Image: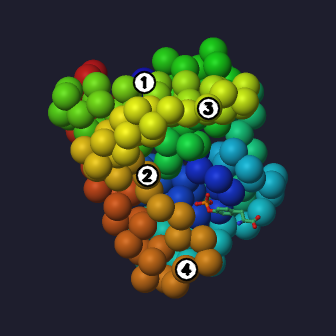
Amino acid sequence: MNRILFVCTGNTCRSPMAEGIMRKILSEEGLTDIEVRSAGVAAYEGTQLSDHAASVLKNKGCVGPSASTFLSQILIDWADLVLTMTSSHKRHTIQLYPEAVDKVYTLKEYVQDDPQLADKISEMESLITELELKQALSGQITEEERERVLTLQKELPLPDIADPFGGSYREYEKCAWEIEECLIKLAAKLKKDR
Ligand SMILES: N[C@@H](Cc1ccc(OP(=O)(O)O)cc1)C(=O)O
C-alpha cells in the first residue's frame, strides 16, 4: 500500500487538502516510503488550488499539489489505494475504471473499524448501484426498495466529506479537520498493516 490517490470533484479543495495533510502525517510518522497524490473526477488540468484550501494547507505547514489534475487511467494504475471524498465519487470512479473496484473506497469507509458498519455500507452501495441501473433501464423503483435505502441511510453515519467549495475560510478549516481526523486513523491503519 505505497501509493495513495485521493479523489474529489474539482481537485481544488478536498483532495488537495487530503494530499497535503497526509504527506505531513506520513513524514511525522516515519512512513516516508508512502506516496500520495490527488485528482478530481470533474477537474480541469492545471487549475490553481482554491485560495482557502491553499491558506489552510500553508497554516498547517503542509504542502499540497500546485495545480489540479483530472482523474486518469494513468493515476488509477499508479495507485495501490484510491480514497474518495464521497460515495458518489467512489461510484463514479468504479464506473469509469471497473477494474479498480477492489482498491477504491470512500475515505470514511476505509478508516472506520466497525465490521457491522462496513457490511451495512457495502449493502447500501450495492443497493444504490442496483437502483441506479434499474432507473437507467427505465425500471420503476418499488416502495420497498425506497424504504430500504431510507432505513440504511438513517442507520449509517454520513459517508461523505462535504464540499466546502465557495465557502468561508472557516468552512475550509472545518473540512480540513474532518479530513485530518480520518487521515490520522488512516496512518495508524497503514502502520498496523505493515
Ligand atoms: N464547482 C466547480 C467545480 C468544483 C466542484 C467542487 C470542488 O471542490 P473539490 O475540489 O473539493 O471537489 C471544486 C471545483 C465549477 O463550477 O467548475
Quarter of the rendered structure image containing ligand 1: bottom right
Q: Which numbered mark, 4 or 1, is in the foreground of this view?
A: 4
Q: Is residue 8 above or below residue 105?
A: below
| Disc ID at residue 183 | none
- Say which of 152 and 53 sits in front: 152
Q: Which residue is mark 1?
A: 1
Res 63 seen here? no
Q: Report if the CB atoms under discs 2 and 1 are less than 8 Å apart.
A: no
Quick one: label 2 or label 1, which is nearer the N terminus? Answer: 1
- Between tags 1 and 3, which lies in front? 3
Label 1, residues with CA under 10 Å away: few <14, some 14-19, many ≥20? few
**Residue for badge 4:** 167
Image point (49%, 18%), residue name: 102
C-alpha span from label 4 to label 1: 34 Å
Q: Earlier in the sequence, mark 1 or mark 3?
A: 1
- In depth, the one of 116 and 23 nearer the eye is 116
Q: CA distance from mark 3 to mark 4?
A: 37 Å
Q: Which residue is mark 3?
A: 140
Dot 1 falls on a residue whose secondary structure is loop
